[in-house]
Image (spheres, helix red, strand yellow):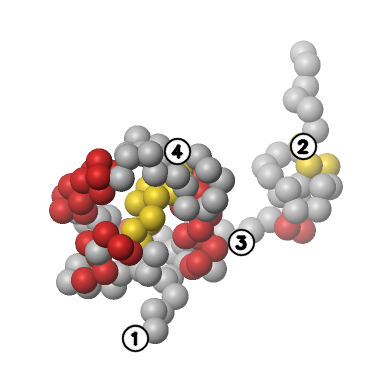
Amino acid sequence: MPQRAASTCVVCGTPITQGRRCEQHRLPPSTRTPDERPSAAQRGYDYKWRNFRYAWFASNPGSTCACGCGARVDVTNGDLDHIIPFRGKDDPLRFDPSNMQAFLHGHHSKKTNKSRGGAGQNFKKRSA
């Protein structure tokens, strides 16, 4: 039976038999349990946000990804990103159209993870 081609660690290039990282570069398991994270609605992404998102994309047809890659972004393949993160449902930045930019979903995930210091990390504090 044919075997799968050997993989290499995404960090150092060492050959590995499974996963994406060698033993030396393996990430520690997450310390946060799934039930510790508030729901999307509790974090401010409720029906009002969904309606705002659809309306923003409808009024900005032909948007391109804010990362600069030039890809077209619409409601089916993209995310609407807050340039300055909002804090709570009453924050005026939550629905400020001038505080929005469109990203392809994967590019938005990378941007968010980088700004938070890695996946699953807490938000950085916004200066007042």
| Badge 3 density bin: few <14, some 14–19, many ≥20, Cα 10 Å | few
Residue for badge 2: 7
Disc 3/disc 1 C-alpha distance (Å): 34 Å
Label 2 is placed on what type of residue? Answer: Ser
Identify the element where label 4 is drawn.
Answer: loop
* For residue 83, above or below residue 105: below
Check contact, mark 4 vs mark 2: CB within 8 A: no
Label located before the other in sequence (4 or 2): 2
Marks 1 and 4 close (CB-CB < 8 Å): no
The earlier-in-sequence mark between 3 and 4 is 3
Q: Which residue is mark 1?
A: 128
Q: CA distance from mark 3 to mark 4?
A: 36 Å
The Cα–Cα distance between marks 2 and 1, rounded to whole angstroms, is 47 Å
- CA–CA distance between discs 4 and 2? 33 Å
**Image depth: mark 3 or mark 4 in front:** 4
Image spot of residue 36 (x, y percent): 34, 64
Q: Residue under circle 3?
A: 28
Classify residue 19 as left or right of residue 101: right
